[in-house]
Amino acid sequence: MTTTYNSLRDKRVFITGGGSGIGEALVASFAAQGARVAFVDIADEASVALCARLAAQGLPAPLFRRCDIGDIGGLQTVMRELAAQMGDFDVLVNNAANDQRHQIGDVTVEYYDERIAINQRPMFFTCQAVAPAMVKKGGGSIINVSSISWHVKNGGYPVYAASKAAVVGLTRGLARDLGAHGIRVNTVTPGWVMTQRQVDLWLDAAGEADIKKNQCLPGKLMPEDVANMVLFLAADDSKMCTAQEFIVDAGWC
């Protein structure tokens, strides 16, 4: 049973990549806490369906806007419009990313820049966007999502791994400046989470064997397991946690 965090009720939450996978679990989990959620994604159909499903359950209906987070100007505009509509954000969750596989010799300058534009650059500018209002409020929580890929030295996507390692640096680099204003900045680092994308593209017999070999805990890591950690870090229960990396990987790394 998921813990109820009373401090999250009516909090305003902004999530990137909220339409499917871990993001979908984040949107649903915050809505179940009574939070007011806004999110962006490029998956229109899945995002609209998620909003309708949560509203049908009697939960606060999330606000969805289609947005390519690689377009920083467009992202900033959407965030301003959503904040004007629902109020300034108390919680930011930087979740969106793309773990497209690539080999070292195939990476061009253009491809490298595109990966960084999706997986790294938006995190800074969303933090920049919410910081002034959080400073004015005297607090807030920013949660940046990384990956164990770089911890465990996974191959096959070096630019992705580098961008996810940079998440920890961004978190720690912001925590000191923003902490003086009561704003907490933390990283949540998932292991191999069984989203539909991962199951469809990568989970085979060898993958099943890897899970059994590398996880200390049996069973599959699910999006809800990551969402549970994010809820804790967004809630007042974690009021003295900042600049930290919280790994949710069933003991893989």
Image: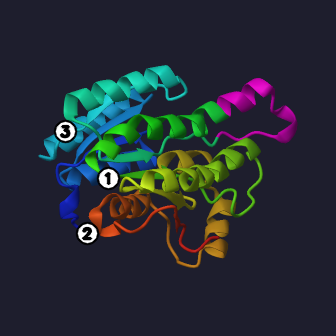
**Label 1 Cα neighbours within 10 Å, binned few <14 / some 14-19 / many ≥20:** some
Q: How is the image coloured?
A: rainbow
* Residue at the (40%, 64%) spot, across then down: 229
Spatial CA distance of label 2 from label 1 is 22 Å
What is the residue that sits farthest to the right in this orientation? Answer: 105
Q: Which sits earlier in the primary sequence, circle 1 or circle 3?
A: 3
Callout 2 secondary element: loop
* Residue at the (51%, 57%) spot, across then down: 187
Spatial CA distance of label 2 from label 3 is 21 Å
Residue 171 screen position, x and y as percent? 54, 53
28 left or right of 23?
left
Residue extent of the magenta highlight: 100-115
**Circle 3: residue type:** Ala
Spatial CA distance of label 1 from label 3 is 25 Å
42 left or right of 214?
left
**Circle 1: residue type:** Gly
Q: Answer yes or no: do the residues labelled 1 and 3 have beta carbons within 8 Å?
A: no
Closest to the observer, 155 or 76: 76
Query: Where residue 3 is drawn, which disc sits there?
Result: 2
The vertical placement of 126 against 237, above or below, is above
* Quadrant for the C terminus in the image: bottom right
Residue matched to label 3: 61
Q: Which sits earlier in the primary sequence, circle 2 or circle 1?
A: 2
Residue matched to label 1: 139
Residue 81 screen position, x and y as percent? 30, 24
**Circle 2: residue type:** Thr
Q: Which sits earlier in the primary sequence, circle 2 or circle 3?
A: 2
